Image (cartoon, rainbow, N blue to C red):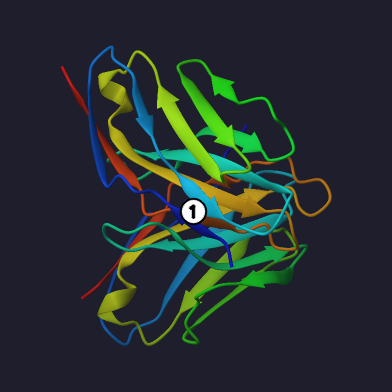
Amino acid sequence: AQTVTQSQPEMSVQEAETVTLSCTYDTSESDYYLFWYKQPPSRQMILVIRQEAYKQQNATENRFSVNFQKAAKSFSLKISDSQLGDAAMYFCAFLRLTYGNKLVFGAGTILRVKS
Amino acid sequence: AAGVIQSPRHLIKEKRETATLKCYPISRHDTVYWYQQGPGQDPQFLISFYEKMQSDKGSIPDRFSAQQFSDYHSELNMSSLELGDSALYFCASSKGQGVFTGELFFGEGSRLTVL
């Protein structure tokens, strides 16, 4: 079974600064997706960024980028120029491309942004 | 385009009652997923359907059942409700096997409170 580990229950960052959230996963699969989801107080699940395992290039979405280390099974999220609106729970998630395509989530990291 | 629609958004039930949650996927999405998120927890996969057939099953209690209908909407039926069933229930949809585009689209969730 796949497992996703987020070792940082909580992180803080000063507005306009950069923060990195960590995620490791365990799988024997070679073909999969990795995601970072943001869950603000509204509890909506918002996709931040996704990475396909077969792509070596790290995904980027504006201020959000990942450091995908496939051999190390590591998938960290870097948020640059942090904004107050970035404050939320962030979940790392793994999806194995099989019949079902279910997502497995990590425990989450609460990100606090200080003004 | 309309996103994933879940109803009701909020539901309050007594112990031992029955509840039904509905999910309407994005147009032309043939796969539906159900997740349960307890307070302070990460979302847990319950069950998924592809083309009206169950495609994967997670930690769904025997008291729960679900199905996907011909119009691809899905319903999650929960019977003999327990206090521990109080949670946010997410539905997500995607295009299915073989044409999966790497993204699950989440609804806003249905919050069930069992008293």
Q: Is residue B115 above or below residue A10?
A: below
Residue A107 appears in the picture as rendered = yes
Instruction: Give the quadrant of the C terminus of chain A.
Output: top left
Density class for disc 1 (Cα within 10 Å; few <14, some 14-19, many ≥20) is: many
Per the image, the residue denoted by label 1 is B6
Residue B5 appears in the picture as rendered = no
Return the chain for callout 1: B
Identify the residue at horizontal 43%, vertical 58% (top origin): B43
Identify the residue at horizontal 59%, vertical 59% (top origin): B33
Which sits in the foreground, A106 or A25?
A: A25
Looking at the image, the residue that sits furthest to the front is A71
Q: Is residue A39 left or right of residue A17?
A: right
Looking at the image, the residue that sits furthest to the right is B98
Total labels: the figure holds: 1
Which sits in the foreground, A58 or B9?
A: A58
Q: Position of residue B38 (x, y in %)?
A: 32, 63
Identify the residue at horizontal 20%, vertical 76% (top origin): B115
Q: Is residue B59 left or right of residue A6?
A: right
Asked which secondary structure carries label 1, the reply is strand
Q: Quadrant of residue B110?
A: bottom left
Which sits in the foreground, B92 or A33?
A: A33
Which sits in the foreground, B79 or A43?
A: A43
Q: Position of residue A102 (x, y in %)?
A: 61, 59
Q: Position of residue A112 (x, y in %)?
A: 22, 32
Q: Position of residue B60 (x, y in %)?
A: 50, 77
Q: Is residue A66 above or below residue B33?
A: above
Instruction: Give the quadrant of the N terminus of chain A.
Output: bottom right
